[in-house]
Image: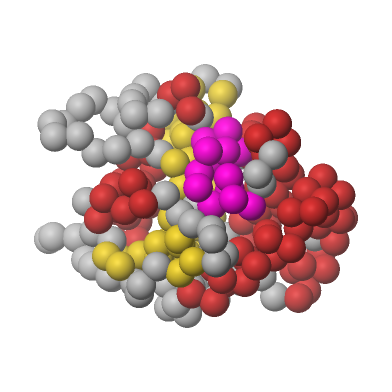
Amino acid sequence: MDAGGRPTGKQRADPPDTVGPLDPRDRTQAAAVLAAALADDPGYRHLFPVRARRELELRAVYRLTLADGLRYGRVMATKLGDEVTGVLALYGPGAYPMPLARWLRQTGRIARIAVRTREHSLGIIRFGELTARGVPADCWYVEAFGVRPDLQRAGRGSVLMRTLLADLDTAGVPSYLETTNEANVGYYTARGYTDAHPPVPLAPSGPLIFPMTRPATRPAP
């Protein structure tokens, strides 16, 4: 899922943040950024309906996600001084969904998430199954993307996405992502993503998952 910002009609200066690989020592802080950024996402509002608990539940989920992503994928972050301001995590082809051996390695974290999320655990499992089913085998998968809410709409999400897409274009590889926030579809469309297939309902009465792909391209010579 994602929460980064929106493209505007005119070019603006990049924020003063640095951008680069996430320092593993900043994982807990980065998980908090993603949890805050995505707490009002339609999918997570459905999965975690208790607002008072939602952000804490998401922090636990994203600590697991980032622990795995740092080891088996790629995690980028923007930082302002010592503070993580934005995060983008992705997996290379074949690295997602996690195989059994990696799930077993995360047993302790999974148990803690189950305790914290309690009655919402089955919904999380269903969401994971739906997203895993749609990831093309040849694509880099954008698993998480978010900017701290008080710093959104200032270009940090754009810097992260631009850095990612430049690297993918240099390598000539496609990418894939999902969003449950229909308002974000235009943001990704402006960056070269198109509908991968029709939206998938998260639940019969729940929000839709919008899957999007971006083809492999090469930068202009």
Image location of residue 139, percent across then percent down: 42, 72
Q: Can residue 112 be seen by looking at this rendering?
A: no
Q: Give the residue displayed 62% in from the left and 56% down from the top.
A: 69
Up-down: is 38 above or below 154?
Answer: below
Up-down: is 17 above or below 39?
Answer: above
Q: Can residue 62 be seen by looking at this rendering?
A: yes
Q: Is residue 137 magenta?
A: no
Up-down: is 42 above or below 85?
Answer: below
Q: Which residues are magenta?
A: 35-47
Q: Tell me the quarter of the picture where residue 160 sits.
A: top left
Q: Give the residue displayed 20% in from the left and 34% down from the top.
A: 8
Q: Give the residue displayed 50% in from the left and 29% down from the top.
A: 148
Please, which residue is most extreme toward the bottom here? Answer: 137
79 vs 23, left or right, is left
Which quadrant is the C terminus positioned in? bottom left
Predominant SS of the magenta segment: helix
